[in-house]
Amino acid sequence: MGGLYHHWKIALENRDGAKSEFRAGRYSNVGLLAIRSLEQAIEACASKEGFHFHDNPRTAHRMRREWLRTKFPELVEKWDILWSIYGVLGYGGVNGERAREAIRVLDETLEVLRRTCIEAI
Protein backbone atom coordinates (compact mmCIF):
# COMPACT_ATOMS: atom_id res chain seq x y z
CA MET A 1 0.00 0.00 0.00
CA GLY A 2 1.59 3.25 -1.12
CA GLY A 3 1.21 6.69 0.29
CA LEU A 4 1.03 10.17 -1.13
CA TYR A 5 4.54 10.43 -2.57
CA HIS A 6 4.69 6.84 -3.76
CA HIS A 7 1.53 7.25 -5.84
CA TRP A 8 2.50 10.72 -7.03
CA LYS A 9 5.87 9.41 -8.25
CA ILE A 10 4.09 6.68 -10.23
CA ALA A 11 1.62 9.23 -11.61
CA LEU A 12 4.51 11.31 -12.93
CA GLU A 13 6.27 8.23 -14.36
CA ASN A 14 3.07 7.30 -16.20
CA ARG A 15 2.67 10.87 -17.46
CA ASP A 16 6.27 10.94 -18.69
CA GLY A 17 5.71 7.55 -20.32
CA ALA A 18 2.61 8.85 -22.10
CA LYS A 19 4.60 11.78 -23.47
CA SER A 20 7.41 9.49 -24.60
CA GLU A 21 4.96 7.15 -26.33
CA PHE A 22 3.32 10.14 -28.02
CA ARG A 23 6.67 11.28 -29.42
CA ALA A 24 7.26 7.73 -30.67
CA GLY A 25 3.84 7.63 -32.37
CA ARG A 26 2.57 4.76 -30.20
CA TYR A 27 -0.77 6.38 -29.54
CA SER A 28 -2.60 3.43 -27.99
CA ASN A 29 -0.05 3.51 -25.17
CA VAL A 30 -0.69 7.23 -24.64
CA GLY A 31 -4.32 6.60 -23.70
CA LEU A 32 -3.42 3.76 -21.34
CA LEU A 33 -0.64 5.63 -19.58
CA ALA A 34 -2.66 8.84 -19.34
CA ILE A 35 -5.56 7.19 -17.53
CA ARG A 36 -3.14 5.25 -15.31
CA SER A 37 -1.37 8.49 -14.44
CA LEU A 38 -4.63 10.12 -13.41
CA GLU A 39 -5.61 7.08 -11.35
CA GLN A 40 -2.29 7.19 -9.51
CA ALA A 41 -2.66 10.93 -8.87
CA ILE A 42 -6.10 10.29 -7.39
CA GLU A 43 -4.65 7.49 -5.24
CA ALA A 44 -2.00 9.94 -4.02
CA CYS A 45 -4.53 12.59 -3.03
CA ALA A 46 -7.00 10.13 -1.53
CA SER A 47 -4.26 8.47 0.53
CA LYS A 48 -4.08 11.68 2.59
CA GLU A 49 -7.58 10.78 3.79
CA GLY A 50 -6.74 7.13 4.37
CA PHE A 51 -8.34 5.86 1.15
CA HIS A 52 -6.51 3.22 -0.89
CA PHE A 53 -8.81 2.27 -3.76
CA HIS A 54 -6.27 -0.10 -5.27
CA ASP A 55 -6.82 -2.43 -2.30
CA ASN A 56 -10.15 -3.42 -3.90
CA PRO A 57 -9.43 -3.78 -7.64
CA ARG A 58 -13.02 -4.73 -8.54
CA THR A 59 -14.35 -1.36 -7.39
CA ALA A 60 -11.22 0.80 -7.64
CA HIS A 61 -12.08 2.51 -10.93
CA ARG A 62 -15.59 3.43 -9.81
CA MET A 63 -14.43 4.57 -6.37
CA ARG A 64 -11.66 6.76 -7.80
CA ARG A 65 -14.15 8.50 -10.05
CA GLU A 66 -16.61 8.88 -7.17
CA TRP A 67 -13.89 10.35 -4.94
CA LEU A 68 -12.93 12.77 -7.70
CA ARG A 69 -16.59 13.75 -8.21
CA THR A 70 -16.92 14.49 -4.50
CA LYS A 71 -13.62 16.31 -3.96
CA PHE A 72 -12.95 17.87 -7.39
CA PRO A 73 -16.23 17.96 -9.33
CA GLU A 74 -14.65 20.31 -11.87
CA LEU A 75 -12.21 17.53 -12.86
CA VAL A 76 -14.75 14.77 -13.50
CA GLU A 77 -15.24 15.94 -17.08
CA LYS A 78 -11.49 15.62 -17.62
CA TRP A 79 -11.58 12.08 -16.20
CA ASP A 80 -14.39 11.24 -18.63
CA ILE A 81 -12.46 12.74 -21.55
CA LEU A 82 -9.36 10.70 -20.70
CA TRP A 83 -11.40 7.54 -20.25
CA SER A 84 -13.04 8.09 -23.64
CA ILE A 85 -9.69 8.75 -25.32
CA TYR A 86 -8.27 5.64 -23.67
CA GLY A 87 -11.07 3.60 -25.19
CA VAL A 88 -10.66 5.09 -28.66
CA LEU A 89 -6.88 4.80 -28.70
CA GLY A 90 -6.81 1.42 -27.01
CA TYR A 91 -8.78 -0.17 -29.82
CA GLY A 92 -7.31 1.72 -32.72
CA GLY A 93 -4.34 3.74 -31.63
CA VAL A 94 -4.00 5.68 -34.86
CA ASN A 95 -5.29 9.09 -33.87
CA GLY A 96 -2.45 11.44 -32.96
CA GLU A 97 -4.81 14.33 -32.30
CA ARG A 98 -6.70 12.33 -29.67
CA ALA A 99 -3.38 11.33 -28.11
CA ARG A 100 -2.30 14.98 -28.06
CA GLU A 101 -5.59 15.88 -26.37
CA ALA A 102 -5.00 13.17 -23.75
CA ILE A 103 -1.62 14.70 -22.89
CA ARG A 104 -3.13 18.19 -22.65
CA VAL A 105 -6.05 17.09 -20.46
CA LEU A 106 -3.78 15.02 -18.26
CA ASP A 107 -1.33 17.89 -17.74
CA GLU A 108 -4.16 20.26 -16.79
CA THR A 109 -5.65 17.76 -14.35
CA LEU A 110 -2.35 16.85 -12.71
CA GLU A 111 -1.56 20.52 -12.23
CA VAL A 112 -4.77 21.06 -10.25
CA LEU A 113 -4.14 17.97 -8.13
CA ARG A 114 -0.49 18.92 -7.57
CA ARG A 115 -1.39 22.40 -6.35
CA THR A 116 -4.20 21.14 -4.14
CA CYS A 117 -2.91 17.83 -2.80
CA ILE A 118 0.85 17.80 -3.04
CA GLU A 119 1.87 21.39 -2.40
CA ALA A 120 -0.81 21.83 0.23
CA ILE A 121 1.03 19.70 2.79
Image (tube, helix red, strand yellow):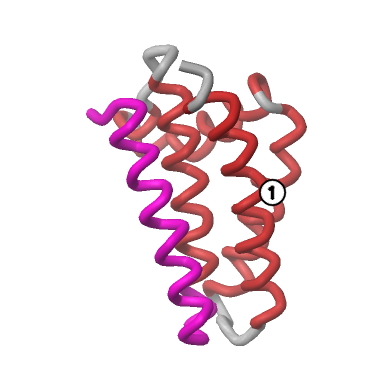
Q: Is residue 89 left or right of residue 48?
A: right
Q: Residue furthest left?
A: 1
- Where does residue 83 sit, x and y in percent of width and height? 61, 55
Look at the picture and state if 33 lies above or below 117.
below
**Which residue is depicted at the point 30% across and 26% down?**
3
Q: In this orientation, which residue lies closer to the viewer: 96 or 28?
A: 96
Picture coordinates of residue 9, whole percent (x, y): 34, 43
Q: Residue at x 66, y 72 (%)?
A: 100
Q: Amino acid at mark 1?
A: Asp
Mark 1 lies on residue: 80
Residue plotted at (49% across, 40% down):
61
Does dot 1 land on a helix, a strand or a loop? helix
Instruction: Name the image quarter holding residue 111.
Output: top right
Q: Position of residue 28 (x, y in %)?
A: 51, 76
96 versus 42 height, above or below: below
* Magenta stretch encompasses residue 25: yes
Which span is picked out in magenta?
1-29
Would you place residue 50 above or below residue 93 in this image?
above
